Amino acid sequence: MGKIIVVGGGAAGMIAAGKAGSRGHEVHLFEKNNRLGKKILITGKGRCNLTNDCDVETLLENIPGNPYFMYSSFYRLDSSETQALFHRLGLETKVERGRRVFPVSDKSLDVVFALEQYLRENKVKQHLDSPVEEILVSDGRAVGVRLKKGTIIEADAVIVATGGLSYPATGSTGDGYGFAKKAGHHVTKLYPSLVPLKAAEAWCKDLMGLSLRNISIKIKNKKGKTVFEEFGEMLFTHYGVSGPVILSASRHILFSIDEGYQLFIDLKPAMDEKKLDMRLLRDFEKYANRDFINALGDLLPQKLIPVIAELSGISGDKKVNSITKEERKNLLSLLKGLPLTITGTAGFNEAVITCGGISVDEIDPATMESKFVKNLHFAGEVLDVDAYTGGYNLQIAFSSGYAAGEGVLSQ
């Protein structure tokens, strides 16, 4: 048994520390913040979607960034075993739409409490307000850390679980990338992922806060080719769009967002154009003597009506019974494909996850150990692995952290 230092008290770090402690190691967890799990507290709008209730193959299918690397650790700790671990730690969970797993309490704080219980059970010593400045390496192996205040702590192995660059206010400021580079690792280009998108259209600001359910979106490149489409929910912001389908879409255009993309929102995906046209005709017949602006209430949210009316080119005070077939056709086209011009992302401050990180070709997928420095392990978002929304990214953190905790000093 040895002395292990874990750097970073997030999802991956806490699981790694607890698992290493369960194997009888003396484990010290160093966290720069004044509390553990700061990023966990804000995930899922404070509810924490901690995993997805699915099999390993489905987990892998939802990882666009290096899924093969997670194969070994997912089979070591999969979704059902993660849920069982949290249940044992006193956290009751529930499964919602899309197989998303949440605490029954709807409080992310309870997830942190469960992880803290895991640390206590396994006698992990916690060091808060203790930022690490450097990983100490001697003769090709990790031998400890130097804290920012100058203190040197010796150890037999070090696990780095410092997160990425997303939500930097929670402490994710890229420290681990610096540690990795100094140890000889390559860090790929870093992008904000699962991130809201900015749009050129000023009317987005008028719709700020409007949430749309049961819509579908398409994103097309400048050649008109569809690069992403999905059904679900979205939200308008003062600068563009957000919400589940938008966050997933962002992952598909990160690398070339400057090339120009158009987003098309189908406001009524359950109806094809013919059925929607019949629905419009019925509504127009019902409100034949009303102004056009007052005839769309059965079809659209009130906040959206002025925008649709203006974009349709039909005067808001035009009587419904005088709307031409051509005008109705233009309106129909708008309802089936409301266009937005994507100009960029909201950046790391609002990104759920970081795309990119330490090259996984340089990490042992079974133990998360560096192939360059003995007894130096990496886990979680600091690695070049990322997934879609739905609990998959936290499962990556838990599984990779578990593999690191189990693999440290295992030989």
Image (tube, rainbow, N blue to C red):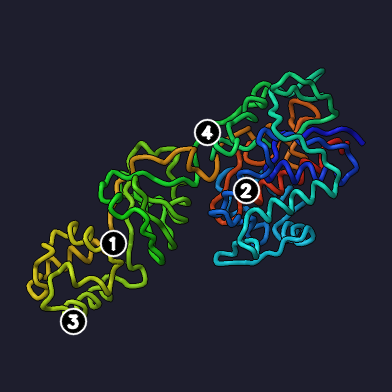
- The Cα atoms of the two marked residues, 1 and 2, are separated by 33 Å
Whichever of callouts 1 and 2 sits on the residue coming sooner in the sequence is 2
Amino acid at circle 4: Leu
The residue nearer to you, when weighing 157 against 141, is 157
Q: What residue sits 10% from the left and 66% below the top?
A: 317
In this rendering, is residue 144 above or below 74?
A: above
Instruction: Give the quadrant of the N terminus.
Output: top right
Give the amino acid at mark 1.
Lys
Residue 50 x, y percent position in the rendering: 64, 55
- Mark 2: which amino acid? Ile
Q: Which residue is mark 3?
A: 286
Question: Viewed as shown, does residue 300 lie left or right of 70?
Answer: left
| First-in-chain label (3 vs 2) | 2
CB atoms at circles 1 and 4 under 8 Å apart? no
Closer to the chain start, of discs 1 and 3, is: 3
Q: CA distance from mark 3 to mark 2?
A: 50 Å
Nearer to me, 40 or 142: 40
Q: Give the number of marks.
A: 4
**Residue picked out by circle 2:** 40
Mark carried by residue 303: 1
Residue type (three-letter) at the residue carrying disc 3: Lys
Q: Where residue 208 is drawn, which disc sits there?
A: none
